[in-house]
Image: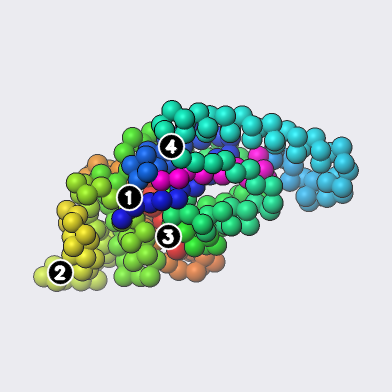
Amino acid sequence: MKLRDLVVLLDGSSRDNAKLAVAAALAKRHDAHLTGLCPLELLLPPDTSFALGGYPDLWAVPEFAKKVEGEARTKAALIEGPFHERLRREGLKGDWRLETGPLIQAITRRSRAADLVVVGQADPDHPLPLAARSLVEDILMTAGRPLLLVPYAGHFETVGTTTLVGWTPTRESARAVHDALPLLAPSGNVTVLTVELPGSASEAEAAPSADIAEHLGRHGLTVTAARTVVSDGLPAADVLLDYAADIGADLLVVGGYGHSRTREMIMGGVTRDLLRHMTLPVLMSH
């Protein structure tokens, strides 16, 4: 199974190079077309939110709007150069898209015509404009495509040679597993892990992930079904990240927002915790 069309979202942050490296490596592995997507609204200064709130009439002043847009276009040009240089150096097919429409609509429209979207984890040292404060969550919930999330710290030379699947018997998990198939190296190892609370299953029963592990094995992958029982109150995201570190995983696969997004915002949730604390690339689908 091959990826043919990839999108990498670039925003001028210090992590653009890491995101582009991961996306370019995948594009090269799959001989895929790579689109560098740069929404102009993502390049606006984070402090321009005051004009959208208390002083919205400022956007009606031609000089103000022209100045802000000009600065954003200058930033975009600085991002575009290294993107084209990467394509040339790696011998990749690709194109550059500078989107000027509303942020989420622009990203969603372009993402729906791709196999995979490479996005960076929110970086607290690189604040985004107001419209992008929940960028990853908004794309995940609206685009209908899998996201490959690259942490804001670390470098990742490989993706999918040792993979951990955080399995729950949900639609989101099933979709994430199948969306991840093109990323899983045929010669690599896959562990399908179920995180359980004490008393949820007896040790004599087969691991709940056994069926999906058997299915992945039919794709020619080396797969292990596993379970771990943890004490109540220990965040499942921490369990997954610790397990990933223990097995040396370079990819974590999970379904995104198994509960309603509103419920997760109020009660917490694996998706939200992973978005904050990821330590390795995460393939996430909703």
Front residue of this view, candidates 41 and 267? 41
Does dot 4 land on a helix, a strand or a loop? loop
Q: Nearer the viewer, mark 4 or mark 2?
A: 4
Residue type marked 4? Leu
Task: Based on the picture, tell me whether residue 73 belongs to the magenta stretch.
Answer: no
Q: Secondary structure at mark 2?
A: loop
The answer for how far apart the CA atoms under marks 4 and 2 are is 45 Å
Say which quadrant the C terminus sits in: bottom left
Determine whether label 2 and label 1 are within 8 Å by CB.
no
* Residue ID for mark 2: 206
The residue that mark 1 highlights is 183
Residue picked out by circle 4? 92
Measuring 52% from the left and 59% from the top, which residue is drawn there? 112
Q: In 3D space, how far apart are the residues under numbered discs 3 and 2 (Cα atoms)?
A: 26 Å
The residue identified by callout 3 is 285
User: What's the residue at 31%, 70% (across, down)?
Assistant: 169
Work out how far the residue at label 3 is from the one at label 4, CA to CA, in angstroms: 26 Å
Q: Which stretch is magenta?
A: 32-43
How far apart marks 2 and 1 lie (CA) works out to 27 Å
Q: Residue at x 24, y 42 (%)?
A: 248
- Residue 228, x across and y down, in percent: 22, 59
Q: Dot 3: few (<14), some (14–19), or many (≥20) neighbours within 10 Å?
A: many
In the picture, the quarter occupied by the N terminus is bottom left
The image shows residue 115, relative to residue 74, as above or below, that is below
Percent across and percent down for residue 101 are 69, 51
Between discs 1 and 4, the one toward the N terminus: 4
